[in-house]
Image (cartoon, grey):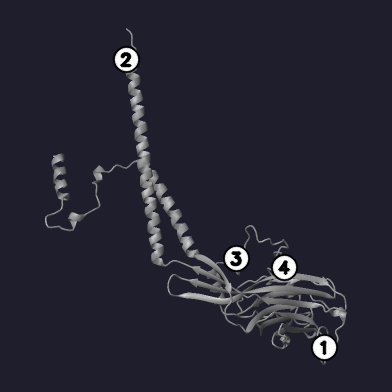
């Protein structure tokens, strides 16, 4: 009866007369009673699932990160103006400081009239989180830029899409900490944005009566000089407060009254763009810069103070991040999973074949041993 029932079921699997589509079924099927589950197949299935998960996660991370292309080119067009953004605290009263800009074209800008100056206390800034000397981290260790360490978001340490996202935030200057009742301010916070000529220039902070002969300015006593300072922001171009530049959160201490701090900055125009695989592209225009410092005590015939010398490089750095579209990403995932499935199938087939060959040899060896024993038997 079982054979008869099996034959009837076999006839039921045949294409029905008139079923044209079913006749072209290219996917073979096996009945459950003809399928055997083995421990080897289960192990290969587990391996296939783990490998598929790892490759899927790796492909997803690669797609999310995108591909970055860095391109250098000669900057086209003529730029006339550039914006400087600064937030500096100097350990001297505001009335004793002069802020000026002198560029290569001979123009002089009285920056003190265009920037904001707030009296403050030195203790409110020197112990802030992340404040460090240039070239060192917040713990005083030399920053070699090698090895793993946690970075703040900003140039070079973040992906392009993070930089573009931070650059699109609304720019606001932080408020100056308030003074307690009866506190006498001993420092000056100078902050804001300043438009200058797009040429080589020198932005400097000097003491009243020194550096420039201005009518009505009184000579400041040399004992009042203290050009210790904290740079919270120093950037070029549109103000993006979330992007960290080399001089941000740096501190420098003057060990004498006549002390001169010089910063030499090489500014590189930079364009960050993110392409999402479609027609939409997000772009921000900014500037990066490299900086070196030279600080030393000077004699009374020289002018002490803070001197930020900047030079505009004639090259343009374009950093573009590209990411495949969703359809392309799904096709890659299908290809990866299909490859894993085929590889696992071949691995399972190969291991089963090896197991079968070894089993045959063992059975053959056991049989020959018994016959040999009989042949050598003597009564």
Q: Determine which quarter of the picture holds residue 303.
A: bottom right
Q: Reading the chain from its start, which is encountered first: label 3 or label 1? A: 3
- Residue occupied by mark 1: 213
Q: In this view of the protein, can residue 179 be seen by the observer?
A: no
- Residue occupied by mark 4: 134
Q: Residue 320 in the image: state x and y as whole percent.
A: 52, 70
Q: Determine which quarter of the picture holds residue 96.
A: bottom right
Residue lying farthest to the bottom in this orientation: 216
Q: In this view of the protein, can residue 197 be seen by the observer?
A: yes
Residue at x 77% of width, y 70% of height:
294
Q: Which mark is residue 157?
A: 3
Q: Reading the chain from its start, which is encountered first: label 2 or label 3? A: 3
Residue at x 66% of width, y 80% of height:
84
Residue at x 32% of width, y 14% of height:
375
Q: Reading the chain from its start, which is encountered first: label 1 or label 2? A: 1
User: Disc 2 and disc 3: Cα gap in Å?
Assistant: 80 Å
Q: Nearer the viewer, mark 3 or mark 1?
A: 1
Q: Which mark is residue 103?
A: none
Q: Residue 257 in the image: state x and y as whole percent.
A: 85, 75
Label 2 neighbour load within 10 Å: few <14, some 14-19, many 20+: few
User: Disc 4 and disc 2: Cα gap in Å?
Assistant: 92 Å
Question: Contact, CB < 8 Å: mark 2 with mark 3?
Answer: no
Q: Reading the chain from its start, which is encountered first: label 1 or label 4? A: 4
Label 4 neighbour load within 10 Å: few <14, some 14-19, many 20+: many
Q: Which mark is residue 374?
A: 2
Q: Nearest the camera: 295 or 36?
A: 295
Q: Residue 368 in the image: state x and y as whole percent.
A: 33, 21
């Amino acid at each position: 009866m079982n054979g008869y029932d099996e034959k009837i079921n076999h006839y039921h699997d045949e294409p029905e007369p008139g079923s044209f589509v079913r006749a072209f079924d290219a996917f073979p099927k096996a009945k459950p009673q003809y399928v055997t589950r083995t421990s080897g197949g289960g192990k290969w299935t587990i391996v296939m699932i783990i490998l598929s998960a790892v490759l899927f996660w790796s492909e997803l991370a690669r797609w999310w990160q995108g591909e970055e292309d860095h391109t250098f080119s000669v900057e086209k067009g003529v730029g006339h103006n550039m914006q400087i953004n600064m937030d500096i605290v100097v350990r001297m009263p505001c009335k004793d400081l002069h802020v000026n800009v002198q560029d290569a074209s001979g123009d002089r800008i009285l920056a003190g009239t265009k920037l904001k100056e707030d009296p403050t206390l030195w203790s409110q800034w020197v112990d802030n989180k992340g404040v460090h000397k240039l070239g060192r981290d917040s713990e005083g260790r030399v920053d070699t830029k090698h090895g793993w360490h946690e970075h703040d978001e900003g140039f070079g340490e973040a992906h392009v899409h993070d930089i573009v996202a931070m650059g699109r935030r609304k720019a606001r200057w932080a408020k100056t900490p308030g003074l307690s009742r009866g506190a006498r301010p001993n420092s000056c916070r100078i902050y804001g944005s300043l438009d200058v000529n797009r040429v080589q220039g020198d932005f400097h902070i000097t003491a009243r009566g020194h550096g420039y002969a201005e009518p009505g300015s009184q000579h400041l006593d040399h004992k009042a000089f203290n050009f210790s300072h904290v740079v919270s922001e120093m950037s070029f171009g549109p103000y993006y407060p979330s992007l960290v530049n080399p001089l941000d959160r740096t501190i420098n201490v003057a060990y004498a009254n006549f002390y001169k701090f010089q910063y030499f900055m090489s500014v590189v125009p930079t364009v960050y763009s993110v392409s999402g695989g479609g027609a939409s592209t997000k772009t921000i225009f900014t500037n990066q810069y490299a900086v070196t410092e030279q600080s030393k005590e000077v004699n009374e015939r020289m002018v002490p103070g803070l001197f930020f010398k900047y030079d505009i490089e004639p090259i343009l750095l374009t950093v573009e991040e590209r990411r495949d579209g969703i359809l392309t990403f799904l096709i890659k995932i299908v290809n990866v999973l299909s490859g894993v499935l085929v590889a696992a199938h071949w691995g399972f087939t190969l291991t089963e074949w090896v197991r079968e060959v070894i089993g045959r040899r063992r059975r053959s060896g056991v049989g020959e041993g018994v016959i040999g024993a009989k042949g050598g038997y003597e009564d």
